[in-house]
Amino acid sequence: MTAGRFAPSPSGDLHVGNLRTAILAWLFARSTGRDFLLRIEDLDRVRPGAQEGQLRDLRAIGIDWDGPFVRQSDRAALYADAVAQLTAAGLVYECYCSRREIHEAPSAPHHPPGAYPGTCRDLTDAQREVRRSERPAALRLRATIGSQTVTDLLHGRVDGAVDDIVLVRNDGVPAYNLAVVVDDAEQGIDQIVRGDDLLSSAPRQAYLASLLRYAEPTYAHVPLALNAGGKRLSKRDGAVTFRELASKGIDVRALILESMGMTSVEDFDPSRLPREPWVFVPPA
């Protein structure tokens, strides 16, 4: 099976920018003969009722999906198997650093800004025993390369940094990068359409996929929706959710298609998609 997907986190209502990304993912999949799958990424904060509201809004703008949706919270065994495979290959180590310690640590000359500096990478057994008594360990990937190249349908060749990403947080919850890589591969998802704020994650995820012997998917990172000030659209900006806009008489599906220069889904042509962000000014 080949498939595309949309994978929201049930932390609240989807805003019109999220819905725009969902429509694009759906259009990319359907126009290439792929199935379209829905995955609920509920490993982090979950707001009661949010999932039901998101499903309702997706259906309201004409998005359908194949088969039942899946929840990440039901897939712990798959993530554990992936970590076990990486551990057996010597590619996992314990990390005891707090966020503050990572932020304050000097960066290695060959590491990009924000990359993990490798503080816990080569601890001795004795040092690990001491750190274990101080705080629970996260599990990190022992990366063997510093960069990876992926090809994006909208951005072309993308060279990105690879560092020792977290695989399992110190509370035992699988980290985002591990979960999405495993889920996409196990679900047969070979086309990933998502916001371009995640473009820098693609090289790391492609590298992790290669270590797990997964095929690299096709990527298309689409522009985000911004507010009038040029910042990422959020619910603080006013009427931005489906229900808020619909209550003002706005056809949300038509609004989203118009933002892409389309009047119907039959007009979809990836080569003609706007490459710049969509600036959305909520109605008064």
Image: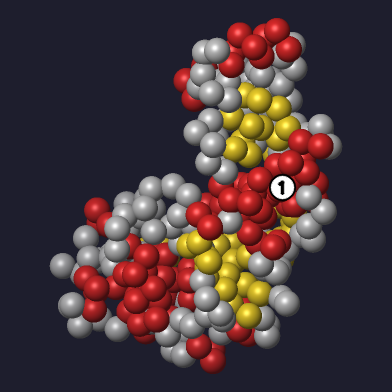
Q: Residue at x 61, y 47 (%)?
A: 177
Looking at the rendered image, the quarter that the N terminus falls into is: bottom right
51 left or right, relative to 134: left
Q: Residue at x 83, y 37 (%)?
A: 89
Q: Is residue 136 above or below residue 92?
A: above
Position of 241 relative to 235 (above/below) = below
From the top left corner, tell me how far across and down residue 156 is, in percent: 71, 61
How many callouts does the rendering have?
1
Q: Quadrant of the C terminus?
A: bottom left
Q: Is residue 283 in view from this perspective?
A: yes
In front of the other: 31 or 80: 80
Q: Which residue is mark 1?
A: 82
Q: Is residue 252 above or below residue 217?
A: below
* Circle 1 crowding by C-alpha within 10 Å: few under 14, some 14–19, many from 20: some
Q: Tell me the residue at 54%/89% (across/down).
A: 267
Looking at this view, is 277 or 251 the one in front?
Answer: 251
- Where does residue 182 sit, x and y in percent of width and height? 67, 55
Q: Secondary structure at mark 1?
A: helix
Compared with 213, 35 (above or below) is below
Residue at x 59%, y 61% (from the top left corner)? 221
The amino acid beneath tag 1 is Ala
Q: Quadrant of residue 225?
A: bottom left
Residue 170 placed where, x, y %? 53, 30
Q: Nearer the viewer, residue 15 or 133?
A: 133
The type of colouring in the image is secondary structure
Displayed quadrant of residue 17: bottom left
Query: Quick check: can you spot residue 24?
Result: no
